[in-house]
Image (cartoon, rainbow, N blue to C red):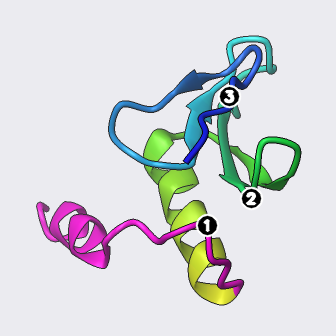
Amino acid sequence: MKRCPIPNLKKSDKYHGVYYDSELPEPKRWVARANMSCARFAYIGNFETELEAAKAYNDYVKKYKHRNIYPIFDMVFNDLENKD
């Protein structure tokens, strides 16, 4: 699969489809988006935390199935929520 550069965005080290944009106003600098191809992407939203953006990405991918995008494993989120 061809990789496409995303200007002004730093990709999350933890979650696919999550980026940090330092040019956005605080506090919502985490961006969730699903890349369909080099020319197309689905903007999901801006979020205060990396985890919120990852959850939104996961929910979007599950709802709108597309052959080039895949959900983040639910097990990751279950583990994080049960750490309390």
Say if 83 sits above or below 37 in the image. below
Percent position (x, y) of residue 4? 68, 31
CA–CA distance in space, label 1 to label 2: 6 Å
- Contact between marks 3 and 2 (CB within 8 A): the answer is no
Numbered disc 3: secondary structure: loop
Residue type, label 2:
Met
Residue marked by disc 2: 36
Task: Count residues near mark 1 (Cα–Cα under 10 Å), then give few for <14, some for 14-19, many for 20+.
Answer: few
Q: Residue at x 72, y 25 (%)?
A: 6
Query: Which residue is at the far left?
Result: 83
Q: Which residue is mark 3?
A: 29
Task: Point out the tag, 1 or 3, that comes first from the N-terminus.
Answer: 3
Q: Position of residue 63 (x, y in %)?
A: 66, 87
| Front-most of residues 13 and 51 | 13
Whether residues under marks 1 and 2 lie with C-beta atoms below 8 angstroms apart, the answer is: yes
Mark 2 nearby-residue class (10 Å; few <14, some 14–19, many ≥20): few
Q: How many marks?
A: 3
Type of the residue with mark 1: Asn
**Mark pair 1, 3: CA separation:** 25 Å
Give how far apart the Cα atoms at labels 3 and 2 are: 22 Å
Q: Depth-wise, is mark 1 or mark 3 nearer the camera?
A: 1
Element carrying mark 1: loop
Q: Is residue 66 one of those drawn in magenta?
A: yes
- Magenta range is 64-84
Q: Earlier in the sequence, mark 1 or mark 2?
A: 2
Q: Where residue 68 sits in the image (x, y, percent)?
A: 61, 67
Which secondary structure is most common in the magenta stretch? loop
Q: Which residue is mark 1?
A: 68
